[in-house]
Structures are given as C-alpha cells and as structure tokens.
Image (tube, helix red, strand yellow):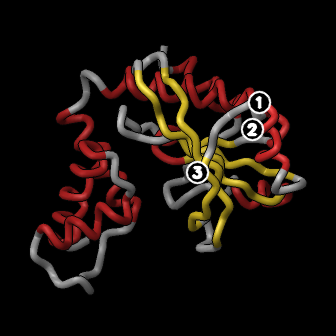
Amino acid sequence: MTDLKAEIAAQAARWVVEEGLEYGPAKRRAVKALGLPTRQALPDNATVDDAVRDYIALFCADTQPSQLRALRALALVWMQRLAQFRPHLGGAVWHGTATRLSDIYLQLFCDDCKSAEIALIDNNVNYVASSVTGRHGQSVDTLSLHAFCPGLNEDVGVHLMIYDHDDVRGALQPDSKGRKPRGDAQALRQLLLEDV
C-alpha cells in the first residue's frame, strides 16, 4: 500500500468515527481535503477498517466499547422483533467499530419483499422506504426508522435491507480477513456475552 493510500485511509477513518460517515463518502472527502485529484486511487475498505480501529484505539478507547455494546443490544431487540425474516446484523455494529454516531444495518431475508413492510405497519412503526446499493452493487429495498437506544439515551438509525429468502446462503461468505461479514441473533448474543 502506498503512503498516499494510508494517508487517505487515516483521514477517512477520522470522519467515519467523528461524524459517522460511511467508508465511501469518507474516502472521497479525504481525497478532496488532501487536495488530490478526484481520480486518485483509493484504499480498499479493509484498509479503512484497519485505520478506523487504530483511530478508535487511540482516541476513543474509553467511550467506544460501551457505545458499541448499547448499539448491539438495540440491534438484538430489533432482530428478535423481526425474527421471522431471518435478520442478520452487518456493518460497524457487527464488526465492532461502531460509535454513538453509527447506524444499525440489519439484512432481512424474506419470502415476500413486502412482508417486512407489512410487519412494521401492523406494529405502528414509522419508516421511510428507499433503495440503497447492496452487497454486489445491486439495488436493495431498504426500510429506515429511528429507534430509541436506552444505552445511549438517544435515537439511532436502524436500516432494514430486504433481500430474497435464498440470498442468505451467499451472505455468510467470509471476507478477505476470514471474518464473517454479518451474523444472526445467536452470533450477536455470543458477542454480547464476550463483551461482559
């Protein structure tokens, strides 16, 4: 890896942690802040993830673990509420790099893509429907809501990404570091037990 990519990753990590930016926008903002050309080669997400972990260890070691635990506890509540849709937690909350500015990303695997939306309506949950770019660059229907997080004493964004029932098989392939990119409720409970 070049020194320039490392510098971009370090700058991006700061905005990921301090402002809750996603990796892509943080990398692009870092390129601009460093005065580099827009076509500059960017570090991969694994490099930014390492930089985020370094940043957290250096500047947030006293606050981040409790914030992460609070977000994981809230994620588990929503996973239990949505158990019929085989929810899997991904993103920073799953990988352990979340701070109080991080949102929760749950991937639901449904027989009928409207069934999760109907479940929210039946339970009087306000949400906003949109589409985001999914795991393989395809458009994925997403239901976004705000939920109160007791451990943080504030609202947190919860995003429910709706996948086809059979997509769960490919969703559990390990990443380049051998880590599972997402986990089910049982795996999340295990993480919460390990954090005690």
Q: Which disc, if any, is residue 153?
A: none
- Image position, residue 22 (x, y; %): 39, 56
**Which quadrant is home to the N terminus?**
bottom left
- Looking at the rendered structure, the kind of residue marked 3 is Pro
* Residue picked out by circle 1: 123
Whether residue 123 sits left or right of residue 61 in the image: it is right
The local secondary structure at tag 2 comes to helix
Task: Report, in whole angstroms, how far the alpha carbon at label 1 lies from the one at label 2.
Answer: 5 Å
Q: Which percent across, then down, holds residue 5?
A: 22, 70
Where residue 181 is drawn, which disc sits there?
3
Q: Amino acid at mark 1?
A: Asn
Say few, some or many: other residues with alpha carbon within 10 Å of mark 1 (under 14 / 14 to 19 / 20 or more).
few
Earlier sequence position, callout 1 versus callout 3? 1
User: Residue 165: x, y in percent?
Assistant: 85, 55
87 versus 49 height, above or below? above
- Going by the numbered disc 2, the residue's amino acid type is Leu
Q: Is residue 46 above or below residue 59?
A: below
Find residue 120 and name its label: 2
Marks 3 and 2: which is nearer the front?
2
Q: Residue at x 20, y 56 (%)?
A: 10
32 to the left or right of 190: left
The Cα–Cα distance between marks 3 and 2, rounded to whole angstroms, is 26 Å
Q: Is residue 7 left or right of residue 56?
A: left
Q: In the figure, is residue 55 to the left or right of 167?
A: left
Residue found 44% across the figure and 17% down from its top: 151
Circles 1 and 2, Cβ within 8 Å, touching? The answer is: yes
Q: Earlier in the sequence, mark 3 or mark 2?
A: 2
